[in-house]
Image (cartoon, rainbow, N blue to C red):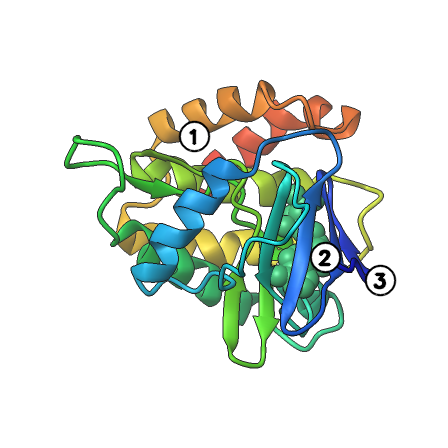
Amino acid sequence: MHIGPLLGSGRTADVYALEGPWVLRRYRDGIDAAGELAVMSYLSASGFPVPRIGPRAEGALPTDLVLQRLTGPTLAEAMLTGVVTAAEGAGLLARLLRELHAIPPRLSLDTGDTILHLDLHPENVVLDPEGPRVIDWLTAAEGPPALDRAMSCLILAQVALDPSFPAGAPVRDLLEALLRRIDEDGGVPAEALARATSLRGRDPRLTAHERAVLDEAAALVAALGG
Ligand SMILES: Nc1ncnc2c1ncn2[C@@H]1O[C@H](COP(=O)(O)OP(=O)(O)O)[C@@H](O)[C@H]1O
Ligand SMILES: [Mg+2]
């Protein structure tokens, strides 16, 4: 496998160009990507918009995934540059959550459970010319869909409370619009918000600021969603 230039980096993974239409997504800290491979393959077969899974590369590590190379901005970038409005962004996030939660679970025998992304926010949606694609399935799990809606809102609220985030970024508008959009799907019940808050509090990847504003973020979601 010939590893090309670095295309992108998030909190946990680096993404490099490979030959052809593929990228190599590699975890920096030794996380095994096998679980993600399974859930992404299942979602792909179910028609959910994830990047296509590529052929297993020679010399690949357990931390690697070969994925379809996406082009285009993330939803976060498109909103910061004003290409996408808060209302449009909220509509897209709500639709992706709803479509994901309409797919039968892969493992759970509980009829109320669905696949959950648990990190579905604008940086994990790429606006590819073929359509929006949801990336970064590290935190995927199965459980009640309200937990996923709560987590997306809680993450947006944490960003809305971050003073280092570009001023004037319409994150609060996005959160308000998302809460309105997901209301018809069941919204964010208090119990789901409490569970999302506790789950997020246990995430070792949170920054000090994100941890400090976690309870305030939960209160903001409750206030705006109530
Ligand atoms: N399939 C892909 N094609 C092109 N770029 C990608 C692809 N997947 C991820 N990226 C880029 O890499 C960045 C980090 O990827 P992501 O899967 O979100 O990892 P992390 O867990 O580190 O956030 C993304 O923001 C995006 O810029
Ligand atoms: Mg990411």
Up/down of 219 relative to 168, above or below:
above
Residue 113: name its quadrant: top left
Name which residue type carries label 2: Met
User: Upstream in the sequence, badge 1 or badge 3?
Assistant: 3
The residue sitting at the bottom extreme is 129
Q: Percent position (x, y) of residue 188?
A: 37, 39
Say which residue label 1 marks: 193
Q: Nearer the viewer, residue 22 or 215?
A: 22
Up/down of 114 relative to 17, above or below:
above
Q: Is residue 209 left or right of residue 185?
A: right
Identify the residue at image location x=57%, y=48%: 136
Identify the residue at image location x=56%, y=36%: 220
Q: Nearer the viewer, mark 1 or mark 2?
A: 2
User: Upstream in the sequence, badge 1 or badge 2?
Assistant: 2
Q: CA distance from mark 3 to mark 2?
A: 13 Å
Q: Nearer the viewer, residue 62 or 140?
A: 62
Label 3 element class: loop
Q: Nearer the viewer, mark 3 or mark 2?
A: 2
Say which residue label 2 marks: 1
For the residues bearing labels 1 and 2, Cβ distance under 8 angstroms: no
Say which residue label 3 marks: 5
Q: Percent position (x, y) of residue 92?
A: 47, 66
Q: Nearer the viewer, residue 33 or 140?
A: 33
Name which residue type carries label 1: Leu
